[in-house]
Amino acid sequence: MAKSKNKSLLLAGLAAGAYAYFRKKENREKAMVAFNNTKTKVNSYLDSQKHDRSDFTTVGHPDPHDIPDNKMVAEGAMTSVQYYNEEVQEKNRKPIAHNVE
């Protein structure tokens, strides 16, 4: 029972202190400004954590653990090499002259 009585006295003391502090308009305004600033910061932090990474936000910042994306990039690199080999190098090759006599 002593704990319950001490808890009640503590709560009554806190309520009396809060009433005495917030009785002044200046203190209420300061408390509201502090509360609103904290609320804005917390909301901003939560919004930054919810940010969904779309294809546009990942461009130029590859994730080494994104296996399908890495595979696609590797295949794309091979496609350009294959195109270069087939189109550019083949056209630049000089035909071998056969001497038929």
Image (spheres, rainbow, N blue to C red):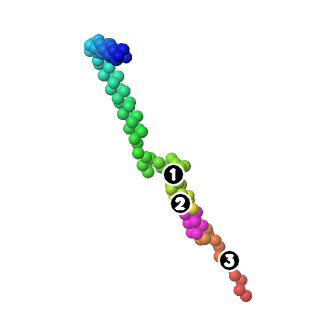
Mark in front: 2 vs 3: 2
Q: Considering only order in the chain, which callout, 3 or 2, is on the residue closer to the N terminus?
A: 2
Type of amino acid under label 2 = Gly
For the residue pair 76 and 35, the one nearer the viewer reads as 35
Instruction: Say the numbered circle drawn on residue 66.
Output: 1
Outermost residue on the right side: it is: 101
Drawn side of residue 69 relative to residue 16, left or right: right
* Above/below status of 84 relative to 22: below
Q: Which residue is drawn at 56% across and 66% down?
A: 83
Quadrant containing the N terminus is top left
The quadrant of the rendering that contains the C terminus is bottom right
Whichever of callouts 1 and 2 sits on the residue coming sooner in the sequence is 1
Q: Where is residue 36 in the image (x, y as percent from the top left)?
A: 33, 26
Quarter of the figure with residue 28: top left
* Res. 52 mark: none
User: Do residues under tags 1 and 3 come within 8 Å of each other at their CB atoms?
Assistant: no
> Could you tell me which residue is drawn at 65 percent across and 73 percent down?
94
- Specify the principal SS of the magenta part: helix
Q: What stretch is highlighted in magenta?
A: 79-87
Residue type for callout 3: Ile
Residue 87 percent coordinates (x, y): 57, 69
Secondary structure state at the residue bearing disc 3 = loop
Q: What residue type is labelled 1?
A: Asp
Residue 76's mark?
2
Instruction: Give the SS element for disc 1.
Output: loop
**Image vertical order of residue 100 relative to residue 1, above or below:** below
Q: Is residue 60 visible?
A: yes
Question: Disc 3 marks which residue?
Answer: 96
